């Protein structure tokens, strides 16, 4: 798998698919059906927002997903060191190391959609 193919797969699985799940959960889950205290509070807050506010919150969630994924890819690429991790962090697919430019490719992909 090429680095481009990998970041496209990550973008689909982590950003697009998960964002669709969060969007659906926020927009369709009745507060009285939620059991987790955090989700009860989150749904209660979401339901107080107008449509623009709801859309903005979903965009914020998307940006958090993108930023977090990019940070992890930066660690794998070796450009974002992590305190307490001694040694190289590498990512391989089928035995082929694909790290080195994953963060940059992922960020470029998410700039264009």
Image (cartoon, helix red, strand yellow):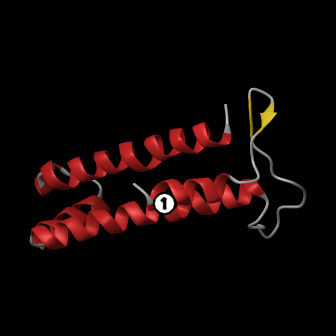
In the displayed structure, does residue 63 sit left or right of residue 78? left
* SS at circle 1: helix
Residue for point 9% across, 72% down: 50
Of 91 and 100, which appears nearest the observer? 100
**Relative to 61, residue 92 above or below:** above
- Image quarter where the C terminus lies is bottom left
* Label 1 crowd (10 A; few <14 / some 14-19 / many >=20): some
In the displayed structure, does residue 89 sit left or right of residue 36? right
The spot of residue 43 in percent (x, y) is: 19, 62
Residue for point 71% across, 54% down: 101
**Relative to 65, residue 60 above or below:** below
Residue ranking furthest to the right: 87
Residue for point 30% across, 45% down: 21
The spot of residue 112 in percent (x, y) is: 43, 57
Residue for point 25% across, 70% down: 56
**Residue bearing the label numbered 1:** 66
Tell me where residue 74 sits by quadrant: bottom right
- Image quarter where the N terminus lies is top right
Of 101 and 34, which appears nearest the observer? 101
């Amino acid at each position: 798998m090429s680095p481009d193919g990998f970041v496209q797969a990550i973008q689909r699985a982590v950003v697009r698919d998960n964002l669709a799940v969060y969007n659906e959960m926020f927009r369709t889950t009745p507060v009285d059906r939620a059991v987790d205290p955090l989700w009860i509070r989150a749904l209660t807050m979401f339901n107080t927002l107008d449509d623009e506010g709801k859309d903005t919150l979903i965009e914020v969630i998307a940006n958090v997903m993108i930023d977090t994924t990019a940070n992890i890819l930066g660690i794998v690429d070796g450009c974002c060191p992590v305190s307490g991790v001694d040694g190289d962090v590498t990512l391989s697919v089928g035995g082929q190391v694909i790290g080195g430019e994953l963060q940059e490719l992922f960020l470029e992909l998410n700039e264009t959609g």
